[in-house]
Amino acid sequence: MQNKALIVGASGVVGSATAKVLAEAGWDVTGLARKPGRQENVTPLVADLLDPASLGTALADVAPTHVFIASWLRQPTEAENIRVNGAMVRNLLDALRPAASVRHVALVTGLKHYLGPFEAYGKGTLPQTPFREEQDRLDIENFYYAQEDEVFSAASRDGFNWSVHRPHTIIGKAVGNAMNMGTTLAVYAAICRETGRPFRFPGVETQWNGLTDMTSANVLAHHMLWASTTPEAANEAFNVVNGDIFRWSWMWQRIAAYFGIEAAPFDGTVRPLEEQMADDAAIWREIAERENLVEPDIDRLISPWHTDADLGRPIEVVTDMSKSRRMGFTVYQPTDDAFTGLFDELRSERLIP
């Protein structure tokens, strides 16, 4: 029986990478999104996860064996995040119930499982690092927990297996994505090169000098493929990172070198990208028109608020991968290669100069 994947959030960083990996592995892949893009060997499906009636109609003829949920909608408060994003997962799994075809559901969350939601991100009493999957939930409202609980409830009701995947900051390509550090830094570097402005690290000293890790969208996609087809990995939560660790004081130099600019010395002053790039829309449009780039709207490419949140954390953030390694997952990618691979892809598709 051929594996049939339904990827929810197929136009995003994680969803598009997962669709590519599964299609290359010979899966029948359907990509669900409100505005699905065109992707080779992926059947697009337009649906709104917050509209149960239209969702049921859209999924009436879809009978996936595996569901990969990589979608969320940012709301102004965590209470709204919980209400909206919990409902999205619940509506999806309710709509799939009549076909009784689902064998596995993979849910992508992230390290806010350990760090708390954006309203309390990196504040208060923080857990010990490296983060490990057996650490308890924080005693605070968190929409990741609400999403997990919806999956657990449906799995108990309908008899499918599940996996939860907790990546660190994800490196991958997507346009119009809510959280995209790699493309944000590429656009920032291109603007610094264009204007002669210093390429300044926007975060805090703890992130500049401390150890950290990240997650390639490709590594995450392979991890979901592995967990959804490995019996020993069923009904488990996993951290997912590239496998290396680095300091931003080193990585900042690597990124600057790729774009042919100098990395400004870090003097300990926090200079958020949201402030540095607040007036850059016109500059980017000029660059895009001159270089014949395909996306002149800077807001479709960058998410400085998210990059600032990551690089402003007051603790060193590293993530333990031992659980996956012990079970046999061995995919690895150096994070500097993940960055340069993304930059190469953005250039080849005329998204950056």
Image (cartoon, rainbow, N blue to C red):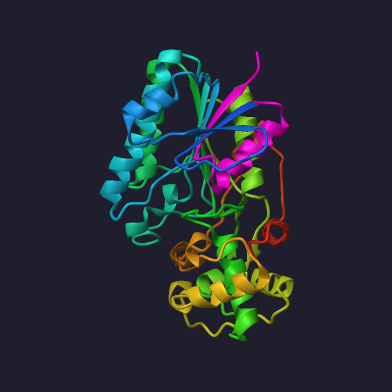
Q: Is residue 66 magenta?
A: no
The residue nearer to you, when weighing 88 against 293, is 293
Q: In which quarter of the image is residue 240?
A: top right
60, above or below 187, in the image:
above
Q: Does residue 271 appear left or right of residue 217 in this picture?
A: left
What percent of the width, then of the height, locates residue 213?
60, 57
The residue nearer to you, when weighing 285 against 126, is 285
44, above or below 184, in the image:
above
Q: Does the magenta stretch include residue 12?
A: yes
**Where the N terminus falls, by quadrant?**
top right
What percent of the width, then of the height, locates residue 174?
57, 52
**Residue drawn at 26 percent across, 48 percent down:** 79
- Which segment is the magenta one? 1-27
Does the rendering let one see residue 220?
yes
202, above or below 108, in the image:
below
**Where the C terminus falls, by quadrant?**
bottom right
Q: In which quarter of the image is residue 39?
A: top right
Does the rendering let one see residue 140?
no
